[in-house]
Amino acid sequence: MAENQSFEELDESEVVSAAQAGDALAFEELVRRHGDKIFRRALSMLRDEDTALDMAQMAWIKAWKRLKQFQGDSSFATWMTRVTINVCLDHIRKMKRWKFAESIEDLDENSGGVERKLPVVEANPTEGLEREELREKIDQALGQLSEGHRAVIVMHTFEEMAYKEIADAMGCSIGTVMSRLFYARRNLASILQRMLKEGETS
């Protein structure tokens, strides 16, 4: 980097490389660029601002310590989000608030696959909503899900993580992820339907 050149002017890969070499100012630039997103992701997992702030801070500390593990296979933002999700999952487990999904998780995924055993939910309770209103309703509904269901929705729908990645993060089988995701979606749809009905009658 040229003398007096600001990290703000550099491409992300250059900032990451400088941070990996131990430059704290480069890492501060990464925090500046992605801090809001990381906090929002922690908040979507934990639903408590103070706790989310603490876990986001812890995620950045872990990222600094493990930065050399980042190989550039994905974007830094994606890697950092994975770190944050794992920190949040660890927190949930330590608080003993981890709520596993119903006993359907124990279905033998080798006998035809969980998804073929479960009914399809076709109703779209959010049809017709404006984008901003939809985002707000979904955010409110997510807050009413159990930690386990909320986590799998966030990882699969928002972060587009593969079943294997989610299973590794949650410490369970792929079949369990599939069944938990089914119930999470069903519960989310049910909550949204109830919220919309309440809105119509209020």
Image: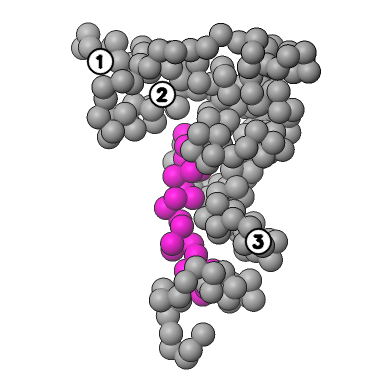
Question: Which span of residues is magenta-colored?
Answer: 24-47
Image point (43%, 62%), residue name: 33
Residue 44 can be seen, yes or no: yes
Quadrant the C terminus occupies: top left
Image point (45%, 27%), residue name: 142
Residue 199's mark? Answer: 1
Residue 15 location (% of width, % of height): 52, 72
Q: Nearer the viewer, residue 69 or 128?
A: 128
Residue 70's mark? Answer: 3
Q: Are marks 3 and 2 in contact (CB under 8 Å)?
A: no
Residue 141's mark? Answer: 2
Q: CA distance from mark 3 to mark 2?
A: 34 Å
Return the disc, 3 or 2, that comes first in the chain's sequence: 3
Q: Secondary structure at mark 1?
A: helix
Q: Secondary structure at mark 3?
A: loop
Image point (27%, 34%), residue name: 132
Q: Are marks 1 and 2 in contact (CB under 8 Å)?
A: no
Q: Nearer the viewer, residue 47 or 22?
A: 22
> Hey, what amino acid is under mark 2?
Ala
Q: Secondary structure at mark 2?
A: helix
